[in-house]
Amino acid sequence: MRALPLRHLRVAAAVIVLSATVGLAACTGPATSATSSSSAAPSAHLVHLVDVDGKPLPGTTGRGWGDDVFASPVESDTTFSHPFSVPSGAASAATFISPRGGEWTTSRWDASGWLGIATDGVLLPNVKISGLTTAGSGDPSGTEAVARRGGDYSLGIAFLDAGGRVIEADFASVTLAPADNPSDATWTWVAPAS
């Protein structure tokens, strides 16, 4: 058997490395790629925050810690008729707040609130920050710690499979003003570009 020339071996090695890189990239989705960035991973769908009447919530208006705010897939939902569609394979849903870049990884969530899902979707989930009562594993953990630290976060809804892995995360970017007393905390949000 004759040995291959060195240039053929280099090409073969490059093809193997490229194949492995492409294969690995195909296997990793947003759930694993968004763990080390301080910027938000892509939201699966646009999320708009609306007031209790379904009208758009102005992004520049500060909201209070305990104010009811609802997530919507449309800019205005005064007819209360535009649910988030349930993706195939979803076994549960949750509202969450996370550091930007941690939206697709439940262990990075600061806090969450579990939701029921119906076959026709999840209609206007309340994403009131003080209502996210399950403290998460993220840093900081729990909404009171988030209020005290302040900063840039993502607020939204996620759908999880039977194993608890995020299969879809829909969220908006929020900025919290730090407050020693969480009930004094305020926040603003950035409306998505439609």
Image (cartoon, rainbow, N blue to C red):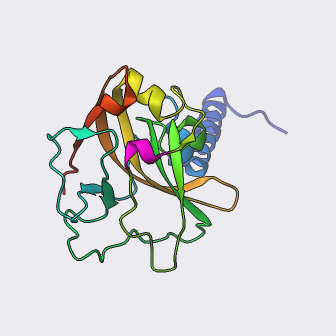
Residue at 56% over, 51% down:
26
- State which quadrant residue 78 falls in: bottom left
Is 47 or 19 nearer to us in this picture? 47
* In-image side of 104 versus 150 (left or right): right
Extreme right residue here? 1
| Residue 37 in view in this figure | no
Residue at 70% over, 56% down:
163
* In-image side of 111 versus 148 (left or right): right
Is 1 or 168 nearer to us in this picture? 168
Mark count:
0
Is 150 or 172 nearer to us in this picture? 150
| Residue 158 in view in this figure | yes
- State which quadrant residue 61 falls in: top left
Is 192 or 181 nearer to us in this picture? 181
Residue at 17% over, 62% down:
55
Residue at 38% over, 51% down:
127
Does 47 sit above or below residue 173?
below
Q: Which SS does the magenta portion mostly show?
A: helix
Quarter containing the C terminus: bottom left
Q: Position of residue 124 (x, y in %)?
A: 35, 65
Quarter containing the N terminus: top right
Q: Position of residue 174 (x, y in %)?
A: 30, 38
Q: Position of residue 44 (x, y in %)?
A: 40, 56
* In-image side of 187 versus 144 (left or right): left
Tell me which segment is drawn in magenta: 128-132
Whether the magenta-drawn stretch holds residue 123 is answered as no
